[in-house]
Image (cartoon, rainbow, N blue to C red):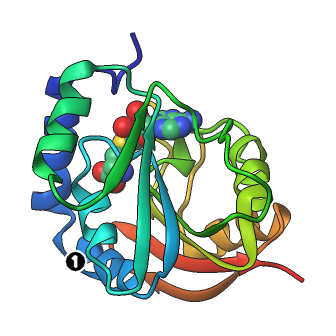
Amino acid sequence: MGYYDSLYIAIKTEMTQRINRCEELRILRGFVQGLSGIVIEIGCNAGYLTGEIASAENVTRTIGIDTNESVAVAMLAKIRNLGKGIKFLYGVSGTRITADNESVDGIVLSHVLEHFEDPAEILADLRRVLKGDGQLVVAVPKEKYLGEFTPDHKILFGSLADLERVLDTNGFKVVEAREIARAIVVVAKIAT
Ligand SMILES: C[S@@+](CC[C@H](N)C(=O)[O-])C[C@H]1O[C@@H](n2cnc3c(N)ncnc32)[C@H](O)[C@@H]1O
């Protein structure tokens, strides 16, 4: 079982998110409010941000994906998002999305990218499914050293420039960015 594959860790992760990441969440909410059409959230955990995405005025369909296979986490996500028309896919990786090429308008990746040894693994598939004018919203923890917040981080994002470099290398261009004390949040588009 992976670190995040339990109800306890899912709830603990979300409590930390709500308590320590207030400012970051406010920025994230603002960015996801600007999304429209079909949006996928990768690493949706218990579906807190997924509900915020689905509430955005111009979002028509929201799909939450997480590798977590816990039935309890999936149930919690569904119950708290009743009536919002969200589809949740648990036990599914963002590196293997079954969506067609260029079929998705928005993708949200909050505190997921830093867990990849090789970010190309996930960003290649996201670039494939995102429409040409689609938006990618990414939030990462801003650490002074790798693993400052959690030992299972694989990439150090010490500044906005680090995140821009990773996205740029993988075919995305940052169009809006906010860098705060403990996080970096950006909106990116496919580079042309
Ligand atoms: C640090 S938590 C972040 C949860 C939430 N998005 C947040 O901002 O607090 C990372 C989440 O990403 C999920 N995850 C990790 N690798 C993934 C992958 N390849 N595809 C989908 N989800 C993944 C984990 O199961 C976990 O729920």
Q: Is residue 149 visible?
A: no
Residue at 43% from the left image edge and 65% from the top image edge: 61
Closer-to-camera residue (116/79): 79
Q: Is residue 37 left or right of residue 44?
A: right
Is the residue 152 above or below the residue 83 in the image? above
Where is residue 58? Give x, y as percent.
41, 85
Quadrant for the N terminus, please: top left
On the image, the x and y values in percent for residue 113 come to 56, 50
34 displayed left or right of 83: right
Residue ID at (21%, 64%): 21
The answer to whether one can see residue 73 in this image is yes
Q: Residues within 10 Å of mark 1 (few under 14, many from 20)?
A: some
Residue 49: image x %, image y %? Answer: 28, 61
Quarter of the figure with residue 32: bottom left
Report x, y in % for residue 125: 75, 49
In the orientation shown, which residue stands out farthest toward the top?
Answer: 1
Quadrant in which residue 74 is drawn: top left
Ligand 1, image quadrant it occupies = top left
- Mark 1 belongs to which amino acid? Glu
Q: Nearer the viewer, residue 142 or 88?
A: 88
Q: Quadrant of the C terminus?
A: bottom right
Q: Which residue is mark 1?
A: 23
Q: Is mark 1 within 8 Å of ligand 1?
A: no
Observer-nearest of 27 and 99: 99
SS at circle 1: helix
Q: Residue at x 21, y 42 (%)?
A: 77
| Number of numbered callouts drawn | 1
Residue 151 drawn above or below residue 111: above
